[in-house]
Image: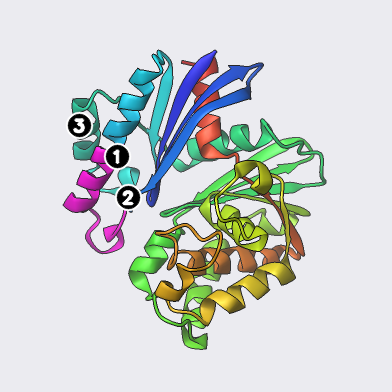
Amino acid sequence: MRAAGIDIGTNTIRLIIADIKDSKIDRIIYQDRKITRLGEGIIHTNELDEQAILRTILALKTFKETIDHFFINKYYAVATSAVREAKNGNKFIKLCNEIGLNVDIIDGNEEAKLIYLGVTSSLDIDNKNPLIFDIGGGSTEFILNKDDKINYKSIKLGVVKLADEINFFDIITDEVIEKTNSIIENKLNEIPFLKEADTLIATAGTPTTLAAIDLELEDYDYRKVHGYELTKEEILNIFEKLRSMTSKERKEIKGLEEGREDLIIPGTLIILKIMELTGCEKLIVSDFGLREGIVIHAATVN
């Protein structure tokens, strides 16, 4: 079954078209992503910015045209943290309808379930007490599989929200790190099962970018990133290098996608704090996550 999935995130919108077999992705036909920062400034206004809406709608229009080009009948498009929190979220959904795109606003638990579906469709989760987490622009989702019982939790902690509150464009001072870590730790205290994890699996832009930087990838290749292992020491080394640069200088780093030069700082601090609190010294990077869960859902449920 061929289907399409669209993930409308706070920072990035992503499209995937794939052949699905036995509830797994058999072959990726096409994929694309664009950083539109839909949730930029929402922490201050509780509304989606008009320019951010326009950027995102224009990008989604090209996604819809691509879906039509491939004659896809089954697709599922979801909006997450930014749209579900914004007072004008329904206005955005109406604009999506006007370009012929039906979009569902999903809550944090549903988002976590789709992330779990996407990650487990491609990685064998046979480690003891694996914790999967997805660092988004507006929220972070956690899924712990303990004794075959799945625990889900979504918290309002995201890289775009942190970047709207703290300046990560300049060289990062100890004071900035201390302030950011305080916010992160306070939010992570909302996860009752965090310290029960024995293995970490991280998905979304921050961990895949860290893997790409470690691999020094000129061009992103999900096959090299997916399943890649990073130690805490390797992540710390990357962070120390990045923090000593301005955002303009970070753009020259191999593997760092344009548009993430400020967001990589809070994202990496979230990862390091999770590793500190769980006591885990390494993590597995998953390129598969929410978007892949969405397309599997489109093929098997809709």
Alpha carbon separation for disc pair 1 and 3: 16 Å
Residue at image mark 1: 59
Task: Identify the amino acid type marked 2.
Answer: Thr
Q: Is residue 101 above or below residue 287?
A: above
What is the span of residues highlighted in magenta in the rendered image?
39-59
Residue 179 as seen in the image, left or right of residue 288: left
Q: Quadrant of the N terminus?
A: top right
Q: Is residue 53 magenta?
A: yes
Alpha carbon separation for disc pair 2 and 3: 18 Å
Residue at image mark 3: 94
Q: Residue at x 53, y 24 (%)?
A: 18
| Residue 200 image offset from top left, x and y in percent | 71, 53
Select label 1 or label 3 by which is in front. Answer: 1
| Residue 21 image offset from top left, x and y in percent | 64, 16
Give the secondary structure at mark 1: helix
| Residue 7 image offset from top left, x and y in percent | 42, 37
Residue at image mark 2: 36
Give the secondary structure at mark 3: helix
Q: In the rendered structure, which disc, 1 or 3, sits on the residue that comes first in sequence?
A: 1
Alpha carbon separation for disc pair 2 and 1: 8 Å
Count the labels in the image: 3
Magenta segment, prevailing SS (helix, strand or loop): helix
Tag 2 near tag 1, CB within 8 Å: yes
Disc 1 packing (10 Å; few <14; some 14–19; many ≥20): some
Q: Residue at x 24, y 31 (%)?
A: 96
Task: Identify the amino acid type marked 3.
Answer: Lys
Q: Residue at x 67, y 74 (%)?
A: 237
